Image (cartoon, rainbow, N blue to C red):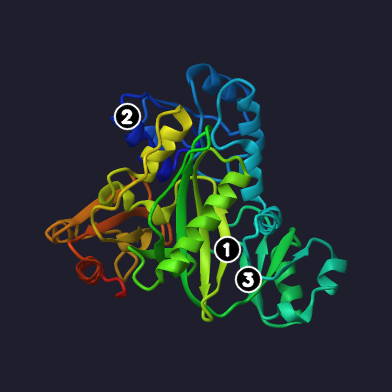
C-alpha cells in the first residue's frame, strides 16, 4: 500500500529474496510501482483495488502512515497485514499516539487537545510558548504552527481551519534522535542503532550513526522505550520512534511512524540487514536477526531544490563529482518531477570512522551547494 520511495526500497529488498511485489497507489508514475512487477492504480479505499490486491498477494504492508487504516482493516479479513490497521490508526492521530506513550510509561511533551472553542479557551498558560499541530495528516513539519501567546494560538487554529489539533509545550531541545525496531508476529524484536538527526525547515537533513553526542545510557533508554511501545501495540513490522533529548538530559518521545523511516535509509549501505529487509522478514514470517552496523556513516537527504539553479531553471546536480568521493552511495527515487522541498533521493556516506563519514558528507554538501553540517 503506497507507491513512494519507501515502497520502492521495500520492493528492491523483496525482489532480492525472490518475492514478487504488487503496489497499490493512485499515481500512475509512482516510484514503487515503477520498480514492482505490478501496480494497481486506484485510490486506497477503492473496493475493487483492495480486492485485487488481496487476491494477488499472500501478505500486505504499507509504506506510509497516511494510507487509510480502514483499508488495512478491510484487507486483514483476507490476508495477513503488517502493521495492523489498529496500530496504524494510533500512529495517525497525535492525541491517540500521546495517550499511548503515556500508557507505556514513555514521557512526551506536556500537551492539550484543541478540538473545540471551549478547549481552546481552557488551554493552560503553562503550555505557551508551544507548537500547535494538526492531530492527523502532518509530516515533514506540515500542519504545525509555533505560537507564543493566546492570540497567536487562536490565529493558528483558524489558519489550520479549526481542525482537531494538539498543542505541545515548546521544550528546550538539545538534539533529536530516532530508534527503529522490528517485531515479528511471534514477538521477536530487534533494533537498529540509535540515529542522531538534524532537521532543517522541518525536514530531515542529516542522520549520523553511531549517534555521536548521545550517552550510552540514554541510547539504551531510547531503545527500551521504542521496544515497549511496539510490544504494547502488538506491533508487527518496522516501527520508528522519534525522540527529543532535552538540555537537562531527559528523553521525551515526539512521534512514531508505522513503517521504515527516512532516518533509517543508511541501513541499506551501512548495516548487514536494512530496515526494509526487516520489514520483509517480519511480514512474511522469516526469522528476524539483530542488524549489525558494519560502517560508521552519515546520510544526507536530497531535496528537489537541488534540481534548480539560482534563476529557478532546471538542472542536473553534479552526480559525477559526488560519486568521485570515497564511500558515497547515491540513491535516487525515480520521481518524475522535482519540486522544492520534495524528497528526491539520499546519499549515504560510509567510512572507517564517524568523523571521516561526516567530513565526506560536508564535502558532498559543498559540491551540491548545501549548508555544511
Answer above or below: position of 83 versus 357.
above
The residue carrying mark 1 is: 253
Labelled pair 2, 3 in contact (Cβ < 8 Å): no
* On-image quarter of the C terminus: bottom left
Give the side of residue 278 with respect to residue 67, left or right: left
Give the side of residue 93 with respect to residue 335, left or right: right
The residue carrying mark 3 is: 145
Answer above or below: position of 326 versus 212.
above
As measured in the structure, the alpha-carbon distance from the residue carrying label 1 to the one carrying label 2 is 34 Å
Give the side of residue 290 with respect to residue 136, left or right: left
Q: Position of residue 161 (x, y in %)?
A: 73, 62
List the single residue furthest toward the front.
217
Which residue is more in the foreground, 340 or 295? 295
Q: How many marks?
A: 3
Q: Residue at x 57, y 51 (%)?
A: 228
Res. 15 mark: 2
Q: Position of residue 201 (x, y in %)?
A: 47, 70
Please rate how many residues cluster around mark 3, counting C-alpha atoms within 10 Å: few if below 14, some from 14 to 19, many from 20.
some
Please rate how many residues cluster around mark 2, counting C-alpha atoms within 10 Å: few if below 14, some from 14 to 19, many from 20.
some
Label 3 element class:
strand
As measured in the structure, the alpha-carbon distance from the residue carrying label 2 to the one carrying label 3 is 41 Å
Amino acid at each position: 500500500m503506497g507507491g513512494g520511495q519507501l515502497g520502492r526500497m521495500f520492493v528492491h529488498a523483496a525482489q532480492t529474496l525472490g518475492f514478487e511485489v504488487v503496489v497499490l497507489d493512485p499515481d500512475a508514475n509512482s516510484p514503487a510501482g515503477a520498480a514492482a512487477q505490478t501496480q494497481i492504480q486506484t485510490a486506497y479505499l477503492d473496493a475493487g483495488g483492495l480486492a485485487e490486491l488481496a487476491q494477488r498477494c499472500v501478505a500486505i504492508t504499507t509504506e506510509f502512515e497516511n494510507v487509510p487504516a480502514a483499508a488495512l482493516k478491510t484487507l486483514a479479513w483476507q490476508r495477513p497485514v503488517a502493521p495492523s490497521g489498529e496500530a496504524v490508526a494510533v500512529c495517525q492521530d497525535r492525541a491517540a499516539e500521546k495517550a499511548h506513550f503515556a500508557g507505556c510509561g514513555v514521557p512526551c511533551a506536556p500537551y492539550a487537545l484543541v478540538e473545540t472553542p471551549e478547549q481552546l479557551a481552557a488551554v493552560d498558560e503553562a503550555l505557551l510558548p508551544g507548537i500547535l499541530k494538526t492531530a492527523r495528516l502532518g509530516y515533514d513539519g506540515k500542519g504545525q504552527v509555533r505560537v507564543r501567546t493566546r492570540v497567536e494560538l487562536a490565529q493558528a487554529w483558524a489558519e489550520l481551519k479549526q481542525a482537531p489539533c494538539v498543542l505541545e509545550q515548546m521544550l528546550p531541545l538539545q538534539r533529536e534522535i530516532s530508534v527503529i525496531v522490528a517485531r515479528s508476529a511471534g514477538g521477536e524484536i530487534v533494533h537498529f542503532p540509535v540515529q542522531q538527526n538534524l532537521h532543517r525547515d522541518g525536514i530531515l537533513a542529516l542522520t549520523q550513526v553511531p549517534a555521536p553526542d548521545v550517552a550510552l545510557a540514554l541510547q539504551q533508554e531510547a531503545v527500551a522505550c521504542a521496544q515497549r511501545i511496539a510490544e504494547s501495540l502488538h506491533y508487527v513490522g518496522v516501527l520508528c520512534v522519534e525522540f527529543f533529548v532535552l538540555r537537562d538530559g531527559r528523553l521525551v518521545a515526539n512521534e512514531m511512524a508505522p513503517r521504515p523511516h527516512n532516518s533509517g535509509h543508511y541501513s541499506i549501505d551501512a548495516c548487514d540487514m536494512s530496515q526494509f529487509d526487516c520489514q520483509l522478514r517480519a511480514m512474511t514470517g522469516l526469522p528476524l536477526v539483530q542488524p549489525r552496523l558494519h560502517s560508521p556513516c552519515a546520510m544526507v537527504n536530497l531535496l528537489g531544490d537541488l534540481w534548480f539553479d539560482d534563476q529557478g531553471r532546471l538542472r542536473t546536480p553534479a552526480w559525477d563529482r559526488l560519486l568521485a568521493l570515497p564511500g558515497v552511495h547515491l540513491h535516487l527515487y525515480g520521481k518524475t518531477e522535482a519540486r522544492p522541498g520534495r524528497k528526491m533521493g539520499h546519499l549515504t556516506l560510509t567510512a572507517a570512522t564517524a568523523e571521516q563519514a561526516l567530513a565526506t558528507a560536508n564535502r558532498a554538501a559543498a559540491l551540491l551547494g548545501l549548508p555544511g553540517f
